[in-house]
Amino acid sequence: AGAACAVARAFPLYSQKKLRQPAEPRGCVRVGFATRSAAISDGAGSVYGPCAKAAAGVRLAARLVDAPPEQLTTTAFVQEAGAVAARLREQGREVLVEVISGDELRERGYGGLYGVGKAATEPPALCVLSHVPDGASKKVCLVGKGIVYDTGGLALKPKEGMCGMKADMGGAAGLLGAFEAAVSIGTGGTALHCALCLAENAIGPTAFRNDDVLCFFSGKTCEINNTDAEGRLVLSDGVAHVTASPSLLPGGGSPDLVVDMATLTGAQMVATGKHFAAVFTNDEETERAAVAAGRRTGDLVHPVPYAPEFHRAEFASKVADCKNSVKDRGNAQVSCAGNFIGENLHPDFEGAWLHIDCAGPAFHADRATGYGVALVLGLLEVEGFAP
C-alpha cells in the first residue's frame, strides 16, 4: 500500500487553473500491482481496498496544503475535519468530533493556541476527532500543527520567507488524512484520536507580541521572544490536551503513544534534508519503529538527538518558565524545538512520544506531497502497512 501512496502523490487534486474556460475532460488512471507471490485481483477484500483508502488520505492531505489561505481558513479546516467524520460515519465507523474555538480557548486555558491565533479574522480552534472501537486495548493520539498561514506575526517574515507559508499546516493535514485512512481501513484494537491545532499567525492590533507571557494548558508559562516560533506554542496546548489527567478524550485512559507532526523548523532541512523528516522521541523502540515505517512507506525519517538536559537551557527565562525561541541557534535547533513541545506532556504521562518535524518533505517544487499519511499508517501497522 506504500506504493499506492507514492502514486497518489503524482496526482494532486487542487487546481485553480483556467477557471473562466470550459473544464477539460478529466482522464482516468488505473493502477495495478504485481507481487512476487501472486497476482492481485481487483476484488472485495483485496489489497486494493487499503491502497485506495491510503491514496485518498494522501491526496486529501495534499489538497489541503495546496489550498490558498483565503480558502483554507481555520473555520474551513474545521469543516474539512467534520467532512472526514461524516464520510467515516457513512462507512459505519463511529467518530466523535469536539471543537474548542475562539474565546472559549482563552477561557479554558489554551493560552498558546489562543495567543497565536487571536489577531486573525477567523478564530483559532482545537478540533479533536476520536474513534474508539469496541474493546480497544491501545490508545494513540495524533497532534498536528495547523497554522493555516504564517506571516511570522509581529516578528514579520520578509517577502521571500513568507511565500509558501500556506503549507505551515502540513502536519495537521497529514494527520487528518492519516486518521481518515486508518479508521476507514480499520484500526483493530486501537483507539485513535486526532487533535488539530488550528490558527493563523496574523498581524493586527490584538496580535501577541514579543515580551508577552502566555500560559499553556499544561500550566507552564512562556515568555515570547519570537512570534515567528509559533508552531511549538499551539502544539504545546495540543499535547497537554491529549495527555491530560483525568483524560479529556472519549474512552478515557492515558495514551500509549502520542505523535505530533509539524512543519516546525527550517533547521530540520539543514539537519536531515528535504526528503527525510526529523524524528525526536523519548522511546528507542518508537524511534526504530518510525525509521522502519518510513522505509516501508516512502515517508522517510531520521532521528535527531534526544537529550532534554542539554536542550532546556536554551529556553531559560527570568520571568516565566521558559522562552519560546532558542538562545543559541547553532545548538541542535530541531531537538530543542521538539523538546519544548514535550515539556508540556502531562507529568503523569508514561507512554511513548514521537515528534516529527516535516518542514522539508511536506512541500516540493511548489506542490504538497501529502507527507505523513503513509508514515502514520505504517506506525499503526494497519492492513497493507504491516511489516
Image: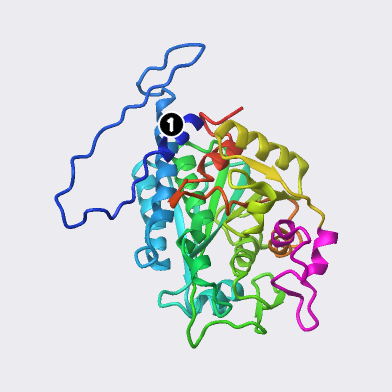
What kind of residue is marked 1? Cys
Using the image as rendered, state which of residue 348 and residue 385 is in the foreground.
Answer: 385
Using the image as rendered, state which of residue 237 and residue 4 is in the foreground.
Answer: 4
Q: Is residue 332 magenta?
A: yes
Residue drawn at the location 40% of the way across and 54% of the way down:
66
Left or right: 291 as drawn, with respect to 29: right
Circle 1: element type: helix
Q: Which residues are magenta?
A: 308-337
* Residue 91, quarter of picture: top left
Residue ID for mark 1 = 51
* Residue 380, quarter of picture: top right
Q: Is residue 8 magenta?
A: no
> Where does residue 372 sit, x and y in percent of width and height?
54, 45
Find the residue positioned furthest to the front: 160
Tell me if mark 1 has few (under 14), some (14-19) or many (20+) residues whose alpha carbon lies within 10 angstroms of its own.
Answer: many
Q: Quadrant of the C terminus?
A: top right
Where is 73 relative to 269, above or below?
A: below
Where is 3 relative to 347, above or below?
A: above
